[in-house]
Image: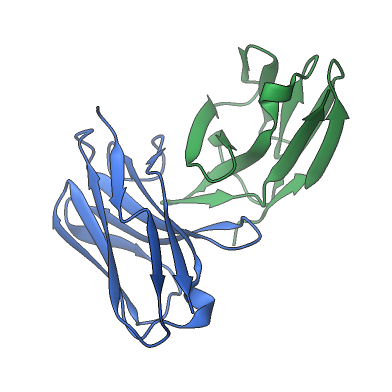
Chain colours: A green, B blue
Amino acid sequence: ELKVEQNPLFLSMQEGKNYTIYCNYSTTSDRLYWYRQDPGKSLESLFVLLSNGAVKQEGRLMASLDTKARLSTLHITAAVHDLSATYFCAVVAGNKLVFGAGTILRVKS
Amino acid sequence: DTAVSQTPKYLVTQMGNDKSIKCEQNLGHDTMYWYKQDSKKFLKIMFSYNNKELIINETVPNRFSPKSPDKAHLNLHINSLELGDSAVYFCASSPGQSSYNEQFFGPGTRLTVL
């Protein structure tokens, strides 16, 4: 059964700093999603990564996928308060989407 | 607005009661899902329907019964509610037949069982 592990689970960072969230998964998959969830809200799709070496960027967020290492990263550049949220990676396994536990990001002024 | 909608947004009920949550999508998608998000924010698939046909049925108590009257609607009925059923339930939909395609999530239904 596919396991998806995210780390860190909680990240407190200062505005303007850079950091990376890691998503490891246990079995082969060639499609991975990153979602954002604000408190009390639904999940919003950020990125879909479709192949090995895929890199997507939107604003201060950049996601990458290494299918050989079974690793995806979500890099935050020069964090701002508005990025505070919970970030989930989710990996396609057969006919299911398996989510990581989520990373709670708090950006402090 | 094109979206996935759920009703109700909040549901507070007593143990032992039976309740339903409704989900509708107007995105023209073929596949719909129910997820449960527990108090630790962990999100897990419960059911998936494709064109009214059940395709995913995870290890969920029999008290939970999904029903899809048409491909735009997927409802979740829960019998004999227990304290452990308290969670946020999200409906989602995607085009095509599987989770391979991007899923769009509804706003969630926060269920509290007292």
Residue A29 in picture, x, y percent from top left: 57, 42
> Which residue is at a point 43% across and 68% down the rendered structure image?
B58
Q: Nearer the viewer, residue A20 or A83?
A: A83
Q: Is residue B60 above or below residue B108?
A: below
Residue A85 located left or right of residue B15: right
Residue A109 located left or right of residue B44: right
Residue A78 in picture, x, y percent from top left: 80, 14
User: Residue pushed farthest top?
Assistant: A59
> Does any portion of residue B27 appear in the rendered image?
yes
Residue A74 located left or right of residue A10: left
Residue B18 located left or right of residue B81: left
Toward which corner of the image does residue B75 lie, by quadrant? bottom left
> Does any portion of residue A23 appear in the rendered image?
no
Q: Is residue B40 above or below residue A5?
A: below
> Which residue is at a point 38% across and 36% down the rendered structure image?
B101
Q: Is residue A60 above or below residue A102?
A: above
> Which residue is at a point 66% across and 36% down the rendered structure image?
A85
Residue A56 in picture, x, y percent from top left: 61, 17
Toward which corner of the image does residue B15 lie, by quadrant? bottom left
> Which residue is at a point 76% across and 21% down the rendered structure image?
A76
Q: Quadrant of the N terminus of chain B?
A: top left
Residue B108 in picture, x, y percent from top left: 42, 50
Number of callouts: 0
User: Residue pushed farthest left?
Assistant: B70
